[in-house]
Image: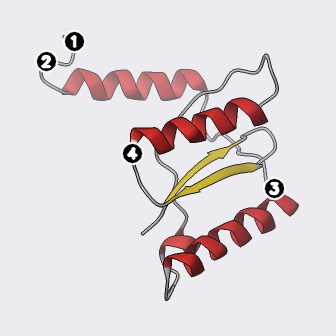
Amino acid sequence: TTTLFAALEIATGKVIGSLHRRHRAEEFKKFLIKLDKEVPAGLEVHLVLDLTNKQIRRGVHRSVQALEKDIRTWIAAWNTNPKPYVWTKTADEILERLANYLNRIPDSED
């Protein structure tokens, strides 16, 4: 297997990716260092830890090297014509929905 850590720059749609053979805090730290180098100083970075893509997940790969090659190819192809992320709800709508959800969970105010 392989681990893909990827970041989506929502304003432009650009993907910054990092492949690792292991899935530990050490590899994640390396990815964060890469992000720090690639993101211009002064910009805020918000992390959402859930990135998957059906095209990669459903692919058939005969080796880890083939999978990693396909991932790198996908990132390069995506970044030739990136698409900005378009929010479908306002921040207030998202926060309200989250608050309603948390109110339904027992002991969530702790």
Query: In this figure, what is the number of numbered marks?
Result: 4
**Whether residue 85 can be seen here:** yes
Q: Disc 3 designates what residue?
A: 82
- Measured from the top left, where is residue 8 in percent x and y? 67, 45
Q: Nearer the viewer, residue 98 or 9?
A: 9
Nearer the observer, disc 3 or disc 2?
3
Q: Are marks 1 and 2 in contact (CB under 8 Å)?
A: yes
Q: Relative to the observer, which residue lies in front, 1 or 108?
A: 1
Gap in angstroms between the C-alphas marked 4 and 2: 31 Å
Check whether the beta carbons of the residues at disc 4 and disc 2 lie within 8 A of each other.
no
At which x and y percent is residue 9?
Answer: 73, 41
Residue displayed at 42% across by 56% down: 22
> What crowding class fits label 1: few (fewer than 14 Cα within 10 Å), some (14-19), or many (20 or more)?
few
Q: Does residue 83 lie above or below 106 as drawn?
A: below
Q: Residue at x 79, y 16 (%)?
A: 42
Report the mark closest to the observer, 1 or 4.
4
Choose mark 4 or mark 2, whichever is in front.
4
Dot 3 alpha-carbon crowd within 10 angstroms: few under 14, some 14 to 19, many 20 or more: some
Label 1 element class? loop
Q: CA distance from mark 3 to mark 2?
A: 42 Å
Residue at which label 4 appears: 24
Q: Earlier in the sequence, mark 1 or mark 4?
A: 4
**Outermost residue toward the left in this view:** 106
Instruction: Identify the residue under disc 1.
Output: 109
Pointer 2 residue: 107
- The image quadrant where one finds the C terminus is top left
Q: Nearer the viewer, residue 8 or 22?
A: 22
